[in-house]
Amino acid sequence: MEEKIRERISRAIEERVFPGCAIGVVRKNDERLVLPFGRFTYDGGSPEVEANTIHDVASITKAIPTSSLALKLIDEGKLKLDDKLIDFLPEFRNSDRDRVFIKHLLTQTLDYDFRLFDKKDKTPDEILEIILTTNFRTSPGEKFEYRDANSILLGLVIERVLGDTLDNLSDKYFFEPLKMTNTAFHPLKKFSKSEIAPTENDEWRGRVIQGEVHDESAFALRPKMVVGEAGLFSTAPDLLIFLEMLLNNGTLNGHKYLSAEVIKLIHTNQLEGIGECHGLGWELHQPRYMGQYSTAETFGKTGFTGCVVVCDIGKEIGLVMLSNATYPKRKPLQEHIRLINAVRRDIADIVFATA
């Protein structure tokens, strides 16, 4: 397996899919492998990627920690799938305000007709107002439509229920007890830039983005809040800890983080009725990046920067791939997705073929 991973990642670096990468694999019995490759940039003098190089994991944030925090609240009876969003966010006031439930946020079934990327030049208050007031194209629950706004709303609900900010809650309930010491929403408060892979030479901000959130809407909202859709920074070893906890049905080192019942909801299709496949809070059975060995119970999450986590409880194995595929400049969207998904798929095939 290791030799095949090295060969595939070396080819990806040669093809300039990304300048560097870290691969992590964990099994339920705590057996793990971490392999770093390449450098921070295509400059031969830039730092080499190491096992503990910190990456911006982008939309993996939606699952770790945002959805996972919501699942914990469901476990504890502090939140229910059929709770109305307006019970926690009365300021939400589009025409469907009485028909939006927590389950819609966890299954990405609110049909917003905009991308938050296009709102990046607006103020934080203006962006939030758009999220809170824009009408949907179809009724809640009728259509799967992956949108950042869903996870932003979910993060706000979590904050209202627990009375603290999302970053503090993530530390308290997951990162600190799991000893994920290199995981943070504000990495430059704890680490130097030399430990963090850059994501892009960004014309919009006029600088190389390194240690600040790459996602434009998450960055635009930062003066007001840490959002649930992007902004987490982590390492392959830290994310393997989280996946190991999931592989062990929510328990690790004698500490129960999530119940086996909630874990089952993660890898059970919640959208069969509308012909889609999505677990509760996590993506489910997506061969386009999970590979040919993906099953109906394989779950995971991608990050736009070039990252992915994939977990299969039945096979008792989890995979992490962290990279900065947006460096030095993001490619056209479809090309970017095609190139990075090809690597994700191939690595998943190598790893899950051994399970």
Image (spheres, helix red, strand yellow):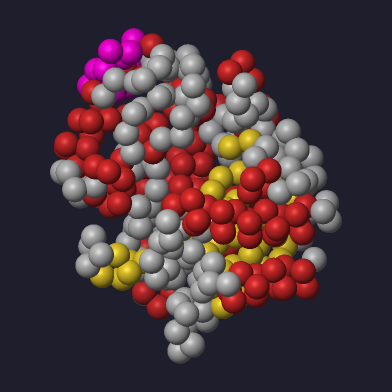
Taking 38 as reference, is 348 left or right?
Answer: right
Residue that sits furthest to the bottom in the current view: 45
* Residue drawn 64% across the image and 45% down it: 288
- Answer yes or no: is residue 199 visible: no
Give the quarter of the image for residue 96: top left
For the record, the magenta segment spans: 87-98
Instruction: List x then y, in percent, for residue 84.
Output: 39, 15
Q: Is residue 193 left or right of residue 236?
A: left
Q: Is residue 212 above or below residue 19?
A: above
Quadrant of image for the N terminus: bottom right
x and y, in percent, of residue 229 in the image: 40, 43
> Looking at the image, is 32 positioned above or below residue 280?
below
Q: Quadrant for residue 151, please give it.
A: top left
Q: Is 225 on the left or on the right of 26, as rendered?
A: left
Pick the residue in front: 211 or 38: 38
Residue 161 x/y as whole percent: 36, 28
Residue 186 is left or right of residue 124, and the answer is right
Residue 235 versus residue 167 in the image, above or below: below
Given the current orientation, which residue lies at the most extreme top position? 98
Q: Main secondary structure of the magenta part?
A: loop
- At a point 71% along the width and 49% down the height, the residue shown is 291
Q: Is residue 196 above or below residue 299?
A: below
Q: Is residue 68 visible?
A: yes
- Residue at (49%, 64%) from the top-left corner? 325
* Residue nearer the viewer, 84 or 14: 14
Which residue in the rendered view is the most extreme toward the right?
Answer: 354
Q: Position of residue 289 (x, y in %)?
A: 63, 48
* Closest to the observer, 208 or 28: 208
Instruction: Tell me, yes or no, whether the highlighted magenta stretch contains residue 18.
Output: no
- Does 90 appear in magenta? yes
The residue lying at 47 percent from left, 80 percent from top is 42
